Amino acid sequence: MPILNAEIAKQLEQVADLLDIEGANPFRVRAYRRAARLIGELPRNVADMVAAGESLDELPGIGKDLAEKIAILARGGELPILKELERQAPPGITALLALPGLGPKRVHALYEALGIDSVAKLAAALEAGKLRDVPGFGPEIEAKLRRALAEGAGQPQRTRLAVAEQTVTPLLAALRSAEGVMAAEVAGSFRRRRETVGDLDIVVAAESPEPVMQRFTSYEDVAQVVERGPTRATVILRGGLQVDLRVVPEESFGAALMYFTGSKAHNIALRQIAVDHGWKLNEYGLFRGERRLAGRTEAEVYQRLGFPFIPPELREDQGEIAAARAGKLPKLVEAAEIRGDLHMHTNATDGAASISAMAKAAASLGYSYIAITDHSKRVTMAHGLNEKRLAQQIEEIARFNATNPGITVLASIEVDILEDGRLDLPDSILKRLDLVVASIHSRFELPMEKQTERVLRAMDNRYFNIFAHPTGRLIGTRPPYAIDMERIMRGALERGCYLEVNGQPERLDLTDVHCRLAKELRLKVAISTDAHRPEELGFMRFGLGQARRGWLEAEDVLNTRPLAELRRLLKRS
Ligand code: DGT
Ligand code: CA
Ligand code: CA
Ligand code: ZN
């Protein structure tokens, strides 16, 4: 999907907020707010306008400078001024904006008068009765804030896994290069591949903790050192993400990694098992009295407890311990088992690359097939394909396949499911495709019954194969639409259709819970990236994380099958 006007507007609004908090010139702030509102309400898609080379400074109230910034955003780029403002602002301060009654002006006043730059400091100031001295604050707003805080408002935002990953990679490299470090790994929800993380937890094995602690707290991206002890520290990075570090001796590394990987519920269950043996399990190891039974590796600790290694994605106390005990742990699907990717876009619609560039990138991942699934005509902002353009693409794919034996490109489409359950293109063209991926891009608000029937009716079309991003949610910004997933899955089984786990970091639907349901019903799923550029084929790792959290094995996944078998599976009777 191209950048939506709403997304551009949101970033302009963020610039305005941060400028306002900083106490910048009100005219400048107002220019950004006006632009945000204009873009948000514009009937046309700004990304399209930019792509078509139209100049934006003809829009009312948009000067050359703002037009350039909007164009950057419309092309999917980052706004330097926003990055800079975010870097300068105290890390927790924007969280205050989420509280009732607190706009940027009042946040500015709180910061000026009392140095309040986080929800925690605000809570403390309220407690101490200090707020009433700040201009513009009174008993009413105080009461409102108290109530909101009591209800848990302003809690730190969770960070999407992919965003956290950008932080993790360089940070781990920095820690691994510190003197005397033997191993450094991320634990916590990140390692369990949750969709979002509250904070990062890093475990390091080192000869002595001091050099690692030093490297960690002086890391260039650290905005604030919250806590620092001899073997543990907590920092907040410039983007606002918190990182907990724990340094342990090598003989405890496995036990510490296990402890900080969690989940808490999994840990508690394991600890109980240790206690039942008369042992003790903690972050230093598994002990009988003073004697260490295990701790150097996780596998060793699990083994001593009587289990095989339990993959982190399963450690949620959702039956994995009983399964391990019974020798019935699933053999979770792995990256090396993926043979192809069944959902991606090209520059024929809103993707950035050609068919051949996508195919070559896929071949370099070792895939033997991909499906090209551009949007259909209804999705106008993505310049969706009509019958004629799709027919041309089918021919282009045939030409590519004829001259490139390394990988098979399947002709496909991401066809829009219309409100009444019809598909956006006629059967006469759908039947010429190798497979049909279908999805919803409109009328998210239909009641559950209607939404469910809409999709079932679409599946009645004999060319429908895979229902893509089946909940429509965008993590943190758009809730899932109401749909009866079990009915959809049973409907898919009856008709010979499949559902997708979408690897885009803000989608990741089906969820883990849905994956488990699919497995229980014996419905296979496709794990697809929905890539809009070659690098995004790597989003397979996020889809895999979700599928693994849902206990899926290779045979549960459509795109682990060799091409011939895939074709058989896609054939509807
Ligand atoms: P998050 O950060 O909210 O996404 O989730 P986690 O699972 O990363 O939780 P976090 O960062 O609070 O703690 C990391 C791990 O440390 C957690 O998964 C298990 C372990 N842990 C934390 N607190 C406790 C506790 O009170 N008891 C036990 N047994 N383990 C704990
Ligand atoms: Ca964590
Ligand atoms: Ca933590
Ligand atoms: Zn797509």
Image (spheres, rainbow, N blue to C red):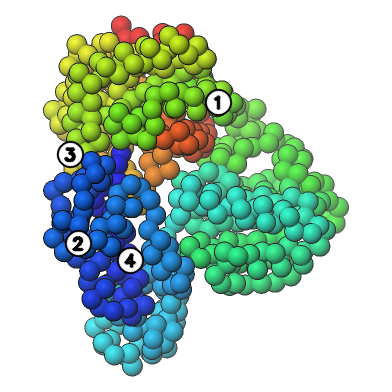
The tag on residue 15 is: 4
Q: Nearer the viewer, mark 2 or mark 3?
A: 2
Name the residue at 77% across, 40% down.
300
The picture quadrant where one finds residue 496 is top left
**Marks 4 and 3, the one that precedes in the sequence:** 4
**Marks 2 and 3, the one that precedes in the sequence:** 2
Specify the quadrant that holds the C terminus.
top left
Q: Nearer the viewer, mark 2 or mark 4?
A: 2
Res. 75 visible in picture: yes
Label 1 belongs to which residue? 364
**Label 4, label 1: how far apart the Cα atoms are:** 40 Å
Image marks 4 and 1: residues in contact by CB distance under 8 Å: no
Label 2 belongs to which residue? 62
**Marks 1 and 3, the one that precedes in the sequence:** 1
Please state the quadrant of the image where ligand 1 appears: bottom right
Label 3 belongs to which residue? 443
Mark 4 belongs to which amino acid? Val
